[in-house]
Amino acid sequence: MSRKVVWKTNNQDQLSLLPPSYDDLVPKNHPVRIVNTILDQIDLSILEKGYKGGGTSSYHPKVLLKILIYAYLRNLYSSRKIEEALGENLHFMWLAGTAKPDHNTISNFRSGKLKGQFKKIFDQVVVLLAEQGYLSLKDIYVDGTKIEANANRYTFVWAKSIKTSRNRIKKQLKELWNYVEKVYVNEEQLPNTPNFEAIDPGKVSQTIDQINQALEGKDIDKKIKQKLGYAKKNWPKNLEKYNKQEEQMGTRNSMSKTDPDATFMRMKDDHMQNGQLKPGYNLQTGTNNQFIVNYTLAQTTADTTTLIDHVDEFIDSYGQAPGQLTADAGYGSEENYADLESKDIEAFVKYNYFHKEQLDQKRGSCKKPFAADKLYYNSEQDCYYCPMGQVMQNIGGYQKETKTGYLQTIDRYRASNCLECPMRGVCHKSQGNRIVERNHNLVRLRAKAKEKLLSPEGIAHRKQRCWDVEAVFGNIKHNMKFKRFMLRGINKVETEIGLIAMAHNLKKVTLAG
């Protein structure tokens, strides 16, 4: 016997005596409520001051900020998609109080009103989360990742190419003047030789005019005449372009024409894992308990030169330095060690061959037993001893400046008699007596770092670093699907990555709750 199927009632035209409010339809522990509650506690007066007043009414910055943060939490980054959600998504409607700012309003707020101001708002949220026990500002884990810029991958400018082009113009000017000298070879008076060292638009234009005047009325080669015409028309203009590009690049080696603040970097996230060069920014983050406590953007490809600015930004944000800092070998330079030491920060930072040292020690072997760092040093007499026991005296030293302007002091030590030494072939390959160079400050700092890294506390920090900071990058790039910026210019991009960082943190609060 078959039973009768009973359908649930569904009358779209039925009126409700008491229409439900949006608040009744939003669950109590929903992420949108977390965003709303946290941002209600934040002082946004710094944004309110950016409004001039007059004219039509404006959407309050708190409303727009809530919309943006929740949109980023939901992986919505397009202002048009956000505008669409405000008219269709119940949670957006509740959060915005049924306000419906269009995509232009949202985009202008993100790239305009928030520019240069968002970091202070982010810091307030981090302090609030620290007070609530979600994270600590005493112990941070630092690492970097590269994120692609919103720029054409093929409109690149290289500093070396500009230098080559300048040298080519200089060489061709000299060749043109050599032609002038050949024309005047049988004449007594030769025109004054131009200055070929000053390769700038004005000087080059003057030099071309000088060559034209010297050849005026002479029977010159047709190709030379064409080349002079091309040079007069293009070289000064090209040099002006080179000057502007060099000014935009600063100390960088490259930049993108569509986003001059972006630098070409080797990205690892392509499917072939072959490290393609793309315009991008180097994101540096400091984390604790997988919460982002600090972020900075660098235009350099290496992490080494970013740590000092990153720590300084942390101190500016929170008025104090972290008690402990853990980072991988990409940050293990003398300058970084010295800076952390001067700021009284306990550093668990590896140097570049730390793991190789441990592996060699475990195997009980060493490929270079006579390397300079294996020689015995007598600190009282300031001398080294070679493998045969001969004294290597200090013969002076020199200072070397790094790219960042940091001065390293290098001491040199020379052996006294290597000519008849039976171990010379395996000890060194130089013709005379062996000379070794040692940076004693770096040796001291690395020994200090090694002691900390091998301590029980150091081992625990090294283990935690992997899942603490690298998991954050995994969430941003894979779960939040944020692999490419939408805005251009480092100031706007800083705002965008700040929104991502705050959305990441509030999502963590949601999961923790």
Image (cartoon, helix red, strand yellow):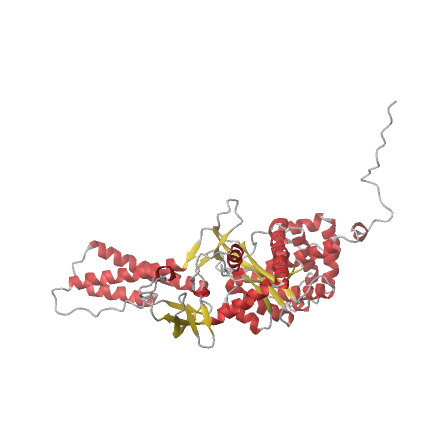
Q: Provide residue 494's location: percent of width, then percent of height.
A: 58, 61
The answer to whether any part of residue 280 appears in the image is: yes
Q: Provide residue 484's location: percent of width, then percent of height.
A: 56, 52
Residue in the foreground of this view, choosing between 79 and 350: 350
Residue in the foreground of this view, choosing between 439 and 475: 439
Q: Quadrant of the N terminus?
A: top right
Residue in the foreground of this view, choosing between 64 and 375: 375
148 over 337 or under it: above or below? above
Residue in the foreground of this view, choosing between 476 and 139: 139
Examine the image and state in which quarter residue 398 appears.
bottom left
Q: Is 367 left or right of 9, judged from the image as shown?
A: left
Q: Is 254 left or right of 233, judged from the image as shown?
A: right
49 over 20 or under it: above or below? below
Q: How many numbered marks does the figure carry?
A: 0
Q: Is 216 left or right of 230, judged from the image as shown?
A: left
Q: Provide residue 89's location: percent of width, then percent of height.
A: 72, 48
Examine the image and state in which quarter residue 429 appears.
bottom left
Q: Provide residue 220's location: percent of width, then percent of height.
A: 18, 58
Residue found at the very far bottom of the displayed protein? 380
Q: Quadrant of the C terminus?
A: bottom right
The answer to whether any part of residue 79 appears in the image is: no
Residue found at the very far top of the displayed protein? 1
